[in-house]
Amino acid sequence: MKNNINKLLLILSVILLFNSCIGMAIDIQMNNDGSGKLFLEYRISRILDGIGRLDGNESMPIIPAGRQDIERTIQRIPGMKLLSYSNRQTEKDIIIGTNIEFNSPQALLAFLDPSGNRASITNNGQSGIFELIIYNEGSALNKFDENLMELMPSFFAGYDFTINFSAPGSSAMIITDADGNSISAPLSSVTTVQGRRVSLSMGVLDVITLSNGLGIKINW
């Protein structure tokens, strides 16, 4: 039992490197004036929720993704408004969905990138550039032993990272590493790199095994 818990805690440490959840879908709808809507869906394994209760701290979930947590974050950001929130459970996951309105690129960035180091937007009213570092830990998995690595594919199976972006007119997406250098889209990814709506989707395990990280640059 102790060995199983240790393995899960090690997996959890990997997940915490990747935005504190397992599956994530981001949908950004940008208007010409820099306002828009942000749709987020988090898929959190119920196994992780159970780990957070091993020490009896039932009232303090390990992943702060409840409605009150989202509302507190939004209240600290001028120009953001929570339009809707949902929380449902399946046998496997806790699925959290939010629909957020923002009135400026600055508000969107403050929510997506509180550190100010992973995202940027320039916007002149008719066009713009959005850049986001999705993952920048590089070879973080190298610290784990072979036995744990053998567990990774089954644990992460079915969990994806997806980002969609749409704006008036046509957009173009460039896939980059964490330093902003253009790279070929990973073979495991599904992409739409040109059009009214551009997107990138790939398995979370495939993301966190990229040695040079992953980012996107979108011109609209």
Image (spheres, grey):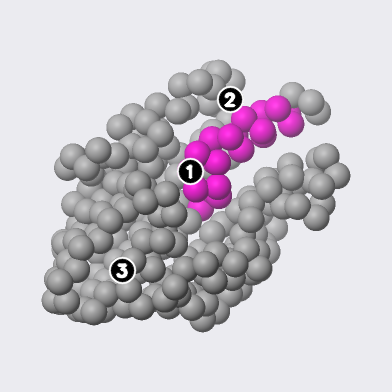
Is residue 18 covered in magenta? yes
Q: What residue appears at the point 60 percent right and 53 percent down from the top-left corner? A: 44
Q: Which residue is mark 1?
A: 18
Query: Would you identify the image quadrant in which residue 125 lies?
Result: bottom left
Is residue 133 covered in magenta? no
Residue 202 seen from this side: no
Residue 100 seen from this side: yes
Query: Would you identify the image quadrant in which residue 96 lies?
Result: bottom right
Q: Which residues are magenta?
A: 4-23
Q: Amino acid at mark 1?
A: Phe
Q: Position of residue 163 (x, y in %)?
A: 36, 59
Q: Please say if the residues under marks 2 and 3 sit with CB atoms less than 8 Å apart.
A: no
- Secondary structure of the residue carrying tag 2 is helix
- CA–CA distance between discs 2 and 3? 40 Å
Query: Would you identify the image quadrant in which residue 146 lies?
Result: top right
Q: What residue appears at the point 40 percent right and 34 percent down from the top-left corner? A: 137
Outermost right residue = 56
> Dot 2: within a 10 Å radius of its alpha carbon, few (fewer than 14), some, or many (20 or more) residues?
some
Q: What residue appears at the point 32 percent right and 73 percent down from the top-left corner? A: 104
- Secondary structure of the residue carrying tag 1 is loop
* Left or right, 105 with reference to 193: right
* Left or right, 111 with reference to 35: right
Q: Which residue is mark 3?
A: 105
Q: Nearer the viewer, residue 219 or 207?
A: 219
- Secondary structure of the residue carrying tag 3 is helix
